[in-house]
Image: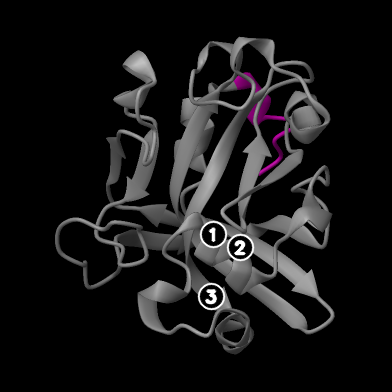
Amino acid sequence: MKLNEIDQHKSTEEIAKNLLGCLVVKETEAGKVSGWIVETEAYLGVEDEAAHTFNGRKTPRVAAMYETAGTVYIYSMHTHHMLNIVTQPEGIPHAVLIRAIEPFEGEDLMLMNRQKQGVELTNGPGKMTKAMGINMSDNGTNIEEKPLYINDSLKKIPQVIEASPRIGIPNKGIWTEEPLRYTVVGNPYVSRKRGKVSVDNGWKTVLK
């Protein structure tokens, strides 16, 4: 997924959906870990009351949000790191939060990092980043370049994508209920999962 070349011409909502099934990878000295993205949330810049850049807020903490599409924005919340990818041209602070992944490579290393098993390993934004070793050192990097990147050679295709309100966004007017969270229906790694788990975890196929 070449955000700088292609996807910046799409809406942030479209990009949030297109990221489902992409393979996000982190390479560390301890080894490589990766997983299929199964849950995302869109944040729509200066007009979005839930975004860190609402009303044009611009501080050193959110500087990465104003960089070019593909820039990684990491912030801390309750000791957890949150992985976001900037989606629009420089100066337009839209981003997508990666909320959960289905592990693919390096699950043993993820288990060492998280000390949890099963879906609890990566079924939430803070859980996922801890399992993958993603931290503030990744802030401001580009998602097309190592050590934290999206592998374009493989992509899974969701059977059904569900849109629903974002999680943990109270008292933000219309933005509390806006359906800006996107999930792979039937995947067990979706946070606060609803419904049955599909035999194929909600995927159609893998494209090479």
Place of residue 76 in the rendered image (x, y in percent of width and height, measured from the top left): 65, 49
Discs 2, 1 touching: Cβ within 8 Å? yes
Q: Is 104 a magenta residue?
A: no
Question: Which residue is found at the position 46% from the left and 38% from the top?
Answer: 41
Label 2 and label 1: CA atoms lie apart by 5 Å
Q: Secondary structure at mark 1?
A: helix
The numbered dot on residue 126 is 1
Place of residue 119 in the rendered image (x, y in percent of width and height, measured from the top left): 37, 74
Q: Secondary structure at mark 2?
A: helix
Name the N-terminal-most of marks 1 and 3: 3
Question: Which residue is found at the position 55% from the left and 85% from the top?
Answer: 111
Image color mode: one colour
Discs 3, 2 touching: Cβ within 8 Å? no
Label 3 and label 2: CA atoms lie apart by 14 Å
Q: Which residue is mark 2?
A: 129
Asked if residue 71 lies left or right of residue 167, the reply is right
Question: Which residue is found at the position 48% from the left and 29% from the top?
Answer: 14
Q: Secondary structure at mark 3?
A: strand
Asked if residue 104 lies left or right of residue 81, the reply is left
Kind of residue indicated by mark 2: Thr
Kind of residue indicated by mark 3: Phe
User: Is residue 68 among the parts visible in the rendering?
Assistant: no
Tell me the crowding category of disc 1: few under 14, some 14 to 19, or many 20 or more residues within 10 angstroms, Cα based: many
Asked if residue 74 lies left or right of residue 99, the reply is right
Q: Is residue 96 above or below residue 93?
A: below
Question: What is the span of residues highlighted in magenta in the rendered image?
Answer: 1-9
User: Is residue 168 among the parts visible in the rendering?
Assistant: yes
Tell me the crowding category of disc 3: few under 14, some 14 to 19, or many 20 or more residues within 10 angstroms, Cα based: few
Q: Quadrant of residue 142?
A: top right
